[in-house]
Image (cartoon, helix red, strand yellow):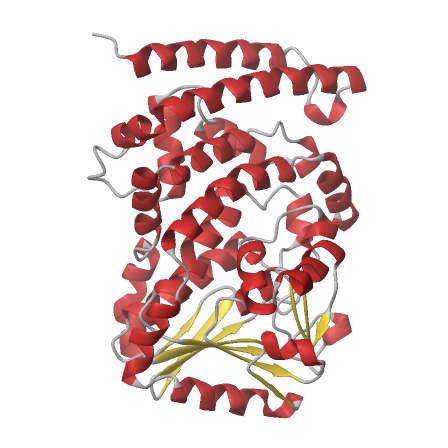
Amino acid sequence: MSTDIDVAARALAERASEVDAFLAGLPEPADRSIEERRRAAEVKAAAQAERRDFLAAHADAVYHRLTGGRSRRLRLPELADEAAAAFPGLVPGPDQVKAERGRAQAAKEGWEIDQGLFFGAVLRSPVAGRHLIETMLEPTPRAVELLDRWRRDGRLDLPSVRMERRDGVVHLTMCRDDCLNAEDAQQVDDMETAVDLVLLDPAATAGLLRGGEMTHPRYAGRRVFSAGINLKRLHAGEITLVDFLLRRELGYLHKLIRGAKPWVAAVDAFAIGGGAQLVLVFDHVVAADDAYFSLPAAQEGIIPGLANLRLPRAVGQRIARQVILSGRRIAADEPDARLLFDEVVAPDQVGAAAERAARRLSEPAVVANRMMLAEPVEEFRLYLATFAEQQAYRLYSDDVVAKAGRFAR
């Protein structure tokens, strides 16, 4: 016997099939005329409205079916794949996702927008959203696989992060020396693995994150914290909504906040964009007196993760608006930097100061108190629901595509 959701799902699948046929009759996205782009945008917008209506009515039922009544823990990509199989036309299937990943951002069809609508609806549900958040806080299979080796050796070199445990403090060094530690999917994967290993390791008392020395011509031989999102990868179409933007927020950044270990950041040179977002989730931040903090996401055309939620709490609404909307930089040696950095020291003192802070935070009572300081989960959930949708649309906006194009390899 058909249920309401089954009837609605069939109608959605039929509509999606019609849209696919229409788009297949057009040239590739990058080769379309202005009129063809306008028509394609209208057709896709109408289909997206239907998906939004379907999810508004059935998001909980969809999630219940995909997860077996919340008995299965599906991470973001697995949940998207299951949704594509169980509800054709709701989100892009694996073949569509794979095809999109092989294209530059300007040449994509924009199927990720449908993923944004789906995850936005799931996160907006108090039941499904909470379950997904809890699922994403669990250790990744990669971390579980590496745990014995890590506990035995206390050292591990991942492609973009080096780890070393020293008297309980785990030192994480971001080592993308050619690109100023600009983040891509590899670094998000490595960082989540590293954070999981620290949280799973009973010998670890605290984590300390710092950037390594660079080979980039402008900063050769200098330590750099992070230049944020890798814009070259964004232009190439390799910065995805699911595996980068959502996984980053629901994965290692949220684990830094919720996990039962304190964290210290050591900021050399600058914390730009995603690096600035990192600063906002650490328990203690040490900065070199020649470093600075900035969030140029609005100039790049995207939303800076959860910074729009977290930065006003740290510096107040007025300064937050100056930073996020107008691109203001805050230098470590100016008065307002006291709201972002706990200590500002000479560049050659950053490491020692961060090490001392990590040892102070290793006191047993710190963990209980920091958990009481964490942002409410419901605020996090509701913000992420809107972020998933809005960031998906931003990724395919004309201004983002044009700006990313400046960073072509």
Quadrant of the image occupied by residue 211: bottom right
The residue positioned 45% from the left and 60% from the top of the image is: 253
Toward the viewer: 133 or 205? 133
Residue 397 placement, left or right of 312: right
Q: Is residue 344 above or below residue 49?
A: below
Residue 66 placement, left or right of 325: left
Whole-percent x and y of residue 148? 25, 69
Quadrant of the image occupied by residue 288: bottom right
Whole-percent x and y of residue 407? 75, 50
The residue positioned 46% from the left and 63% from the top of the image is: 191
Whole-percent x and y of residue 66? 29, 31
The residue positioned 30% from the left and 55% from the top of the image is: 138
Quarter of the N terminus within the rendering: top left
Q: Is residue 217 above or below residue 351?
A: above
Count of residue discs = 0
Answer whether residue 268 is visible to the viewer in this image.
Answer: no
Residue 181 placement, left or right of 89: right
Answer whether residue 195 is visible to the viewer in this image.
Answer: yes
Quadrant of the image occupied by residue 71: top left
Toward the viewer: 222 or 114? 114
Q: Is residue 273 above or below residue 265?
A: above
Whole-percent x and y of residue 175? 56, 70
Residue 78 placement, left or right of 244: left
The residue positioned 77% from the left and 40% from the top of the image is: 402
